[in-house]
Structure formats: structure tokens, C-alpha cells
Image: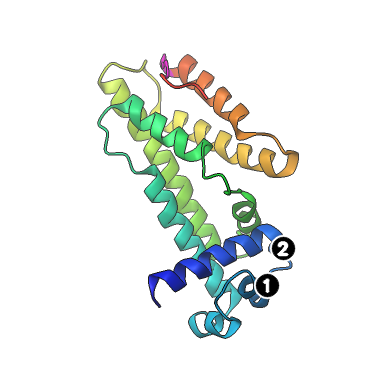
Amino acid sequence: MDAETADQMMEATYRALREHGYADLTMQRIADESSVSKATFHYHFDTKEELLNAFLDHLLEQFEGRLACEASDPEERLDTFLDAIFAPAEDASPIPLIELKSQSPYHETYRERFVAMDERLREVVAGAVRDGIESGQFDEADPDEVARFVVTAINGAHVREVALGESPSETRRLVEEYLERRLGRRPEVAA
């Protein structure tokens, strides 16, 4: 399938999940959110599960792109990471992600993708922390422990945003304070 069609299908899946939730999601509702016909969806994906697996792969690819930071400076890498997490595109919503996370106990392939996403988040944070400690920019700390805390806070921020309507900026503030206390980090950009 060509890239434009694939993008349209993934964007339609995102919109349909956000609008209808997992329980009421159908191939027809996804197609209704797109200029692509239901028959085209079925041509490329035999089932809704196959489509959602492709959608998760798409999300992971987008996520990797947002996390990309070639900077060698650990502070800059952490700032880029926090910006990618807490300053998503205007029309972005964590609802589709939460919807699919809630299904991961029942779908091993979903769980595998979320495990990979969690590992990648922790890897980015732990790597920046490790490099910051080695360069003397950060105080001594267990990089894996710091990463686990930060990623747990991110997951909580998504749930709080969806369930309680709380802005993720509050969690970012708390994460910044944690990193300042734990690592002696003083971010240049406060959210």
C-alpha cells in the first residue's frame, strides 16, 4: 500500500478510537473517518485486530521520530524527551493509547508493543541520566530507577488527562522537580 493511503488509514483509526473507544470500534467506523473505503481497509487488513496492530506499529514509529535527538548533551536529551512527551501536537490525545493499553491484558501483541514502548522510554531517560552522571552534570543516582519513576509518572499523566481532565503540564512540573532534587538538574526551560 502506498504511504499516503497508509497514513490516511492510521489517522482514521486514531480518530475513530478517540471518538468511539475500543468497545465500539468497527472497520466501518474507521472507514467513515477516512476517504478510504471499508473494502480497502479489508483488502489490507483481514481483521480489526490486524489493523490495530499496524496502528500500534505506526504509533511506535511516530513516537521514535519525536524522541529522536542527536544531541550529546544529557540535559538537552532530557529536555527533548520531556518536550516530546508533554508537548504533543495540538490535536493529539492519549485516549487511543489508553484504549489500547486497557486491552493489552487480553491481546499479547498489544502488550508486546507497549512493553517495547515502555522499554524505549526508560532507555532514553536512563541513557541521558547515565551520561549526565558520567560527565558530572548530574548527581549520583541509579539511572534505571530514575527512568522507571519518570516513565511511571508519564503513564499516570496520560490516565489523569483522560480520566480527570488534568493537564499534563502539572505532571511535567512534578517530573522536573523530581529530576532537580534527584539529579541536581536545573532545566533551562520550565513548562
> Residue 151: where, in percent of width, then height?
51, 37
> Residue 29: where, in percent of width, then height?
67, 72
The residue drawn where x is 52% and y is 65% is: 10
Q: Specify the principal SS of the magenta part.
A: loop
Q: Which residues are magenta?
A: 183-187
Badge 1 local density, few (<14 within 10 Å), some, or many (20+)? Answer: some
Q: Quadrant of residue 124?
A: top left
> Residue 63: where, in percent of width, then height?
44, 50
The residue drawn where x is 25% and y is 20% is: 135
Question: Mark 2–mark 1 contact, CB under 8 Å?
Answer: yes
- The circle drawn on residue 11 is none
The residue drawn where x is 62% and y is 69% is: 33
* Residue 53 appears in the picture as rendered: no
Mark 1 lies on residue: 29
Asked if residue 186 is among those painted magenta in the image, a careful observer would answer: yes
How far, Cα to Cα, is label 2 from label 1? 8 Å
* Residue 50 appears in the picture as rendered: yes
Mark 2 lies on residue: 20
Local SS, label 2:
helix
| 148 with respect to 26 (left or right) | left
Asked if residue 95 is among those painted magenta in the image, a careful observer would answer: no
Question: For the residue marked with disc 2, what is the amino acid?
Answer: His
Q: Quadrant of residue 188?
A: top left
Picture layout, residue 30 above or below residue 191: below
